Each structure stands twice: as C-alpha cells, then as structure tokens.
Image (cartoon, rainbow, N blue to C red):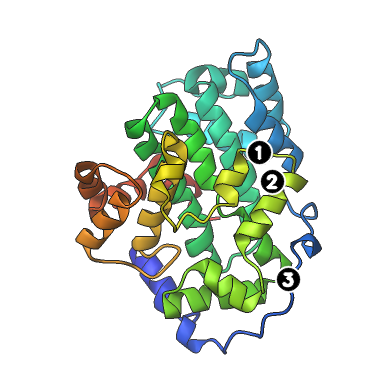
Amino acid sequence: MTTSDVEISRGSSSPASRPPPAQAVRFDRRAIDYHNIPVKADVIAGITRLNVESADCFRDLDNYVCSDPGVATLVLRVVNSAFYSRGDKVTNIPRAISLLGFNVVRSLAMLAFSRSLFALTRNSLFQCHIWQHSLLTALAGQTICAELGDPNDRDEAFIAGLMHDMGKVLLFSHNQNRYLEVLAVVLSKGCTSIEAEREIFGGDHLEVGREAVAQWKLPARFADFMGTDLSRPDPAAWAGDPVRISLAAANYLTRSNGIGARPEADIETRRTGLVAFGLDPGRSAEWAQNEFMASFMEHETYRLCANL
C-alpha cells in the first residue's frame, strides 16, 4: 500500500468521521440504470467476443479501438511507453496491434472502456478502493494465471480483474453517498463489501453484476467474475479454472494489502488464505510477500492508469 493510499484511508474521509449508515430499503437491482452510464456496453460485449482465430479479428479490433478517442489514445500511449517501445514512434492503431499483439490490445481496449466507467468521480476513497483495487487485481491475476495454466488464459484473467467489481461501480453510480457509506463500514468494521452493501442497500454488488451481464449482453462467463463471491474459496468448483482461481487470489491479495479492504499485515495469514483457494503452498508463500503486490504499483500500465 502506497503512502497516498494510507492517507486516503486515514484522511478527512476516514470511516470514523462518517455518520452511521442509513437504514437499508428493499433492494431492486432492476431499478439501477444500466445504460445511462459513460461506457459503451455494446462495444465491451463485442470486444470480449472477438476470436483471434477469425480472419476479421484484427480489422474488428481496429474498428473498436478507433471508435473511441480515449481508447485509441491509451493504446498509443502504451505502445510508445518505455516498456513496449522499440524506438520508432507508433502513430496508428493497426501498427500498434501488430507490435503489441491482438490479446494485449484487446486487454488495453477493455481497460480504457472500463476506466471511463470508473471515472464517475474524483473521490479518493472510490479511486483507491474500487478503481485501483480493480486495476491491481487485473495485473496480479494476469501474472498468477500465467503461472497456473495456459499462458493464453492470462489476458482473460486481466479482463476478469477489471470487470469483477462492476456491480460496485453501478451501485455507486446509483447512489454515490450511500456507497461511500459502504466503504466507510468496510474500512471501519473490517467486514466484507457484500455484508456492508446488504446492510445499507438491502442487496449487494453480486446481484447487480449478474444483472449487468444480462443487460449488457456479455458472455455468460462474465457472471463467474462479476457475480461470484470471491471471498469464499471453493477449490472443488473452481478446479481446472485457472482464470477464476487467479482472480480470487489476486482479489484477496489486493484486499489484504489494504486496497479494497482493511489491510492484513501478517504474511502467514495471507499465505494460508491463498492455500485455501487451492494454490500451491510454495507459490502462496511467494505471492503473500509485500514485494509481490508492490511490484504491480511500478508496472507501466498501473502508472499510466492508476489516477483517473
């Protein structure tokens, strides 16, 4: 957790300074406006369905990226960054796709489109515990997934990390003040966001996430990311699914580092928590170290996108 993150948790917006949460009312997930938001859900759905084996995949990806100036700008910033640059400045999307590869550009396009939805507010609590949490979960999940299974799954793990808390974003857009109360309860009591949401909204972000999958016509697979309680390990159900396991592990590690929840400083507790997801004890010990998550805060993508 960075110095600025500590200040966010302890500053004037700290949980202790907030009034008690409002009494929850009967919750209807369909009352949320899933379409009056600054994101092109149809484009997100289209990007997730692109097949690299298709003869038209590069042309279609080029069209999606170029359909939004913000997406195109991010892709060009990344391809010209120190991490990817090969010396010559890249000024067009087809060239960027050829250099970065289909999967990387697809992930960047998803990052840019999801970022536009997260940029609903400059509130520091929301930026740290929802957006930066999702971005770090995406980066960590990508790395964990590459070690768990087929490297080709790593890009799906990145997208899963970006999208897994979309239900929280939609609840926030529905009622910003009440969702800030949720964050206050999570940080002060140490409870899960699901518990706090049910206390304040009468429902939770998993219900909203599953509804968003249907409303946005996303692949049914996204319900595994946006509508599943990742805090409850289910190794038997997740066996053979490295994307879901890596998402749950990355979500847990980001939360235990104080981004999205109260921090868990004890390394052994973190290691035990990872093993509960069915992960190898040796790898769990490595990933539980502070340096593992800290490395993603130095990642080029995080440095470019952490601040909305």
In the image, 131: left or right of 217? left
Instruction: Work out whether residue 60 can be spotted.
Output: yes
Helix, strand or loop at mark 2: helix
How far across and down, in percent of the image, does residue 113 sit?
A: 64, 43
**In the image, 240: left or right of 294?**
right
Residue farthest toward the front in the current orientation of the protein: 236
Marks 2, 1: nearer the viewer: 1
Q: Position of residue 67 (x, y in %)?
A: 73, 32
Label 2 sits on residue: 213
**Which residue corresponds to mark 3?**
27
**Depth order, front residue of 222/172:** 222
Q: Which mark is residue 220?
A: 1
Quadrant in which residue 242 is drawn: top left
Residue type of the residue flagged with mark 3 = Phe
Element marked by disc 1 = loop
The answer to which quarter of the image holds residue 119 is bottom right
Residue depicted at 60% across the width and 35% down the height:
109
Near-viewer residue (238 or 17): 238
Measured as percent of width and height from the top left, residue 11 is found at: 43, 79
Q: Who's the residue at 49% across and 88% down the image?
A: 17
Residue, far top:
55
Q: Disc 1 and disc 3: Cα gap in Å? A: 24 Å
The local crowd at label 3, few if under 14, some if 14 to 19, many if 20 or more residues have their Cα within 10 Å, is some
